[in-house]
Image: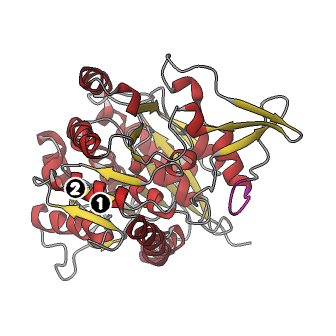
Amino acid sequence: MPTKIRILHLIKSLGRGGAEKLIPETALVHHKDRFEFHCLYFYHQRNNIVDELEAAGIQVHLIPSGNLGLFFQVNKVRAFAKQLGIDIIHAHLPWAGIMARSVGNNLKIPIVYTEHNTWDRYNTISYWGNRMSFKNQDIAIAVSNEVALSMQLNSMIDPYQRGGRMKIKVIQNGVNTDVFRRMSDVGCRIRHGGQVPDVDSSPVGSRELGEAISQVDFSLIGNSRPTPPLERGAGGISLNLKDYLKIPPNAKTIGIVAVFRDQKRLWIWIDLALKILQKSPETHFVLVGDGEWRSRLEKQIEESGKSANFHLVGVQKQVIPYLSIMDIYLSTSEFEGLPIAMLEAMSCEVPVVATRAGGIGEVIQHGVQGFLSEIDEYGELVDYCVLLIKDQDLHQSMSLAARERVVAQFSMKRMVAELEGVYESVIGKESGREKRVGE
């Protein structure tokens, strides 16, 4: 049997951002007979995705460190890669990228780096560390054309210089469209012991969708909610998410899945939601996620007097049930790479109304899968949302077009095939080696 190619994903932390979530999502689709995956991270936080990586067959390792101590860990990472016989280091985001280039040069391991944002969004230390070391890798992957342009404009060398080591390749993010499918009725059958094996309402009835609902964490959805409404029947207990959130069955729902940080501009999101309520007062709003802005957003909502229309449900391991009650995915970001959550929403037939930030404009065709505004013209998004709420035929056509767009152009299968091509190309450069490093 041929020896598997050993890939080490290197990343600072394993929170629930888009960059982190891509690691297990891609691993589930990779050819397991050709690749073996490890993940090394440094900063441990409460809401992490370690269990999801392990479930995807990735061996997860931790070297504890904060930002200031990160680069004192280079020797440990070097020894770790040597011990495991790593073939390729795949780094994500600047801090891990800078470290990987140092480790890879010393051990002669090929380095693949994925850039998830434009460089002007990084702090000064991240920016200059990334820029000064950028040429010391084999392939830099950009998640969008805008990110690729940013790398070309800011790197100190011409990335296409003849004979140069480093190349840039655009591989746009993807989503597993077999798993991310809209559920016709967000409910589930809970048997004794809390297991949720059946999803009668799912259009595909898949085990993955059953697991999605079984992992809805109702303990995170505020302290003021009553016990979820349960309907007993022969098949067990039926629990409906919309009922639990106190959203009327026919009310339109606008939502987002995000880390609550500055770039998302969620204070603007709330402000637009309040303007939408003035024109469509029965609308409800669901925010899935958490972060530093949560308390300020809660205060903004409370002061508006419209708390009953807003639902902050916390970080959820499985977002399919929440995407399935959304009628519109609203994004007010100032900058983006190519947001995974948006692609997942589109795969669940949710049209997008968003600012034209980063790769969003490369995915959404204005007037086809949703509507776009310029980043500083976000006020336009209010009327776009109201239009979709009132025009059911337009909403239906955009919902179907959203999924069709992702299936055709942004599938996880396409993304993984391109990644595997990158891995095999850099291994080809090292084909002269008779042994792995450390063996």
The quadrant of the rendering that contains the N terminus is bottom right
Dot 1 falls on a residue whose secondary structure is helix
Drawn side of residue 94 relative to residue 389, left or right: left
Q: Contact (CB < 8 A) between labels 1 and 2?
A: yes
**To which residue does mark 1 refer?**
387
Marks 1 and 2, how far apart in space? Answer: 6 Å
Magenta segment main secondary structure: loop
* Residue 182 quadrant: bottom right
x, y (%) of residue 216?
A: 60, 36
Q: What residue type is labelled 1?
A: Leu
Circle 2 Cα neighbour tier, 10 Å, few/some/many (<14 / 14–19 / ≥20): some
x, y (%) of residue 39?
A: 51, 46
Which residue shows up at 52% across the image and 25% down it? 220
Which residue shows up at 11% across the image and 55% down it? 377
User: Is residue 91 one of those drawn in magenta?
Assistant: no
Q: Residue 383 carries which label?
A: 2
Outermost residue to the top:
223
Outermost residue to the bottom:
162
Give, as a single range, the part of the protein colored magenta.
201-206
Q: Nearer the viewer, residue 59 or 393?
A: 393
For the question of whether residue 69 can be seen, the reply is yes
Vertical placement of residue 179 versus 92, above or below: below
For the question of whether residue 113 can be seen, the reply is no
Which residue shows up at 18% across the image and 72% down it? 159
Q: Nearer the viewer, residue 345 or 248?
A: 248
